[in-house]
Amino acid sequence: MQIIKKYFSAIEECVRDFSINLESLQSSHSNEFLYTNAITEYKKLFLNLLLCDSEDEIEQSTKELVYFTIEHDISYLFLYSELVTVVRKLLGSLVEKHDFENIEEINNYFTKHENQITTLYLQKFLNQLKSKNEVRLSHIESMSDKKFMIHYESHIKWIINLILYVQKQEFGDDYPQLNPSLCAFGKWMNGASTSYLLSTAHFKSIEHLHINLHDLAANVVDYCKRKELRPATLIHLMQKIDYYSLEIGNEIAFLNEIEESAKDPLTHLLTRRLFNKIILNKLDIAKATGREFALMMCDLDHFKLINDTYGHGVGDVVLQHFSKILEKSLRKSDYIFRFGGEEFMILLPMTDKEETLSLAQKICDVTASQEVTIEKVTIRYTVSIGTLAIVVGNKVSITQDTIDKYIAQVDEKLYLAKERGRNRVE
């Protein structure tokens, strides 16, 4: 330490030469630092550490510096680059003066600082990262309607498990799932229930971020299992993982907005504006595989009479009631749209004519057998259904005209059901 003290003035000069005067808009009445003020304060703590002349002072000053940088979101890379820049400038100055006697001692002095700073930074950073994710998790858990955030919730739990794995430092095989397709979040992404989102930029961005995040996690686990660890590498990897995780959260929030706008507010079924996007996808699949699919158009019989007799509020309850019948009668792979007013369109992937007629008849029978009771008023209603099985030949050009043609054909079948007495399937 006595040798290093000879160079304190040179160290101070190097630090001050490297510092940049930052002017802040910080108000004297503000209770919080702006980032520029935090950097100014950080410079003081940084210099104070390098000019410590005892082990106890170094330990205390290291804590103050590291705690401050993490509290004010000053990255480890910034701290490390400052340390490297100062030592290089100092060593370069000594070489110019042909002062070679204590270069190794000085280099060891700064290496010790680097190791102490990095080790403590990793510990504090992981604690902070775990706390942040626990707060995020509690916010999601308190949401009344999570929508897609329920899947982000499982992702946050995965992140916390990864942090705990690094913190424990036992480095066995109890790490979280590293295969992006097998974790709970990945299984959701590959699930059929989200297929209508597959073409959105946000969904594709999540997919890319998620794969990269798992790739980083695999590197974290692999690195942890090595005998010689450099905390700086783990800091870098975990910071990048946190960045990807936050980006996934942002994209999930956008998907929630898409989901909100894609669902009919009354029935919570898909809206007509999503129909073209989904049927285009199904037409491509049908053309490639040769498998047929089907459309089913439903229209509640004499619905205008219900509205005129009992009011639109009662009519809304009937629409909700029928929506529940559809959801219970159909399969999870089927898509149900409120097409407008009392009209509903159902898209049935990989379904032939016989299966479609069977499902439609089931819906027709269940609807006719049930009743809706509202304030002592009991309403029975029926539904007419038109069906269309579609086989897409290799020569069929898939355009908007193709879609419009199919809609017109199934609508004609629905009209036929109405003409033949209603409460029936055609």
Image (cartoon, rainbow, N blue to C red):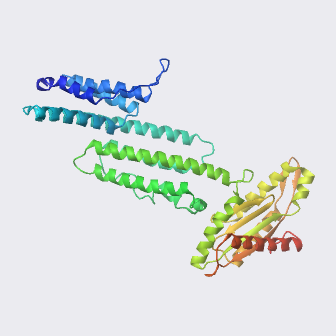
Residue found at the far left of this picture: 101
- Which residue corresponds to the image point at 26% horizontal and 23% vertical from the top-left? 48
Task: Please say if 257 is above or below 390.
Answer: above
Question: In the picture provided, is 144 more to the left or to the right than 234?
Answer: right
Task: Please say if 219 is above or below 115.
Answer: below
- Which residue corresponds to the image point at 89% horizontal and 62% vertical from the top-left? 302
Question: In the picture provided, is 54 more to the left or to the right than 224?
Answer: left
- Quadrant assignment, res 23: top left
Q: Position of residue 388 (x, y in %)?
A: 73, 75
Task: Please say if 411 is above or below 62.
Answer: below
Residue found at the far top of this picture: 28
> Is residue 147 among what the camera can see?
no
- Which residue corresponds to the image point at 60% horizontal and 49% vertical from the top-left? 256
> Is residue 3 among what the camera can see?
yes
Camera-nearest residue between 283 and 330? 283
Question: In the picture provided, is 397 more to the left or to the right than 236?
Answer: right
